[in-house]
Amino acid sequence: MADNRRGRASASLGLRLQAQAEFAPFLRERLRVWLEQAGATTTETFEVVGTITDRTVTISIRDYGTWNSEQTRKEDGGLGLVMMEELMNTVQVKRALGGTTVTMRRRLTIH
């Protein structure tokens, strides 16, 4: 969470919310504040959309940056994509000139 005493955000934001529509405004506000405290500008935007249909959770994240080619990627790159692929049933990455969209799906278990 944010460290207001120093005027900057910590490296991570963790929230655990119920999957109900009334929590969406709270989530957006917490994310906005966290990004502002980290120094993000309004031009550094991205979109997050989540849906549940037929017991399948779909989360799409879109940014407006440019894709790093294999030649410019760090040798010890992050594990984000690997982690997504392990946690979700499907992960699709669409790269375009105007940004990248990652769509993840996971089937909910029946209790």
Image (cartoon, rainbow, N blue to C red):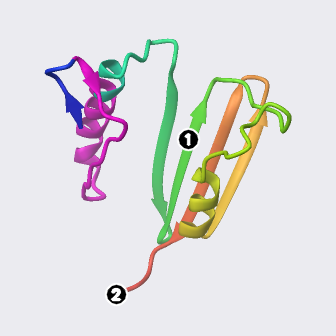
Tell me where the magenta segment starts and ends, as one range: 7-33
Let me know if residue 19 is in the magenta part: yes
Q: Residue at x 44, y 12 (%)?
A: 41
Residue 40 horizontal side relative to residue 56, left or right = left
Q: Secondary structure at mark 1?
A: strand
- Say the numbered circle drawn on residue 43: none
* Residue projecting furthest to the left: 5
Foreground of the two, 49 or 63 = 63
Q: Secondary structure at mark 2?
A: loop
Residue 56 percent across, percent down from the top left: 51, 67
**Is tag 1's residue or tag 2's residue first in the polypeptide sequence?**
1
User: Few, some or many C-alpha atoms within 10 Å of disc 1 (few <14, some 14-19, many ≥20)?
Assistant: some
- The residue that mark 2 highlights is 111
Residue 90 horizontal side relative to residue 73, left or right = left
Q: Residue at x 40, y 85 (%)?
A: 110
**Amino acid at the residue labelled 1:** Ile
Q: Residue at x 23, y 46 (%)?
A: 22
- The residue that mark 1 highlights is 61
